């Protein structure tokens, strides 16, 4: 009985240890995939339009500041002290508004970029998960961070992910 138990235990240990070494590993460069997606190009087109709108608003405020500054400089010698102080405060306040607008615009631009790209990242992640499960992979590594890959042991699944996402890339020249 002890021999059967030992033999069974040995067989289980051998099967378990070989299953650990029989993992299927792949890698994928998500940056390349995301860059080649039409959704990404559309998102950056929208982001560019949003940035141009913010820039136009910034230029409007800047023109207002420049006009008031020119007006102040042209009339500074004929102003009373009270009017001069009022105009200087107005220019200072307008300059502060410009700086605040720049900060808020930068934050809004970053927020818009995250809003536009988050669904794309999620779509790519889900597609990689699907391809990995369908291909029987236990580990998928980020291809853009690999230092060494033994091509005989690891497969690049980027072409499978691209095909599933409908991405066509031009042939290498």
Image (cartoon, grey):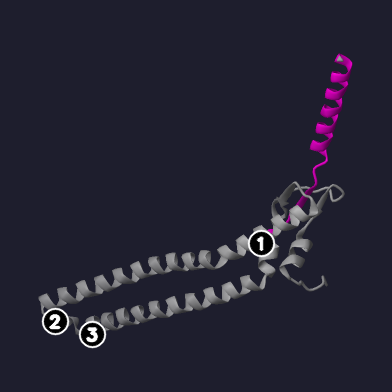
Measured Cα–Cα span from mark 1 to mark 3? 59 Å
* Residue 60 in the image: above or below residue 112: below
Q: Which residue is painted at 16% across and 77% down in the image?
A: 84
Mark identifier at residue 74: 3
Question: How many residues crowd mark 3 within 10 Å: few (<14), some (14–19), many (20+)?
Answer: few
Write the start and end of the magenta stretch as one range.
Answer: 2-31
* Image-quadrant location for residue 95: bottom left
Label 1 or label 3, whichever lies nearer to me, is 1
Q: Which residue is mark 1?
A: 124
Do the CB atoms of the residues marked 2 and 3 lie less than 8 Å apart? Answer: no
Mark identifier at residue 79: 2
Magenta stretch prevailing secondary structure: helix
Secondary structure state at the residue bearing disc 1: helix
Do the CB atoms of the residues marked 1 and 3 lie less than 8 Å apart? Answer: no
Q: Which residue is painted at 66% across and 61% down in the image?
A: 124
Secondary structure state at the residue bearing disc 2: loop
Residue 21 placement (x, y as % from top left)? 82, 37
């Amino acid at each position: 009985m002890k021999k059967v138990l030992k033999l069974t235990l040995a067989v289980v240990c051998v099967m378990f240890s070989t299953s650990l070494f029989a993992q299927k590993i792949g890698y994928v460069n998500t940056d390349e995939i995301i860059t080649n997606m039409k959704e990404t190009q559309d998102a950056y087109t929208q982001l560019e339009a949003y940035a141009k709108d913010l820039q136009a608003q910034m230029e409007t405020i800047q023109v207002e500041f420049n006009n008031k500054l020119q007006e102040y400089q042209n009339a500074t010698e004929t102003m009373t002290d009270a009017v001069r102080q009022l105009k200087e405060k107005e220019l200072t306040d307008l300059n502060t508004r410009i700086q605040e607008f720049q900060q808020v615009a930068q934050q809004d631009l970053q927020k818009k970029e995250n809003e536009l790209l988050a669904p794309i990242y999620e779509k790519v992640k889900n597609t990689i998960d699907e391809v990995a499960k369908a291909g029987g992979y236990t580990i998928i590594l980020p291809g853009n961070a690999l230092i060494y890959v033994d091509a005989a042991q690891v497969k690049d699944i980027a072409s499978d992910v691209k095909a599933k996402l409908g991405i066509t890339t031009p042939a290498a020249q």
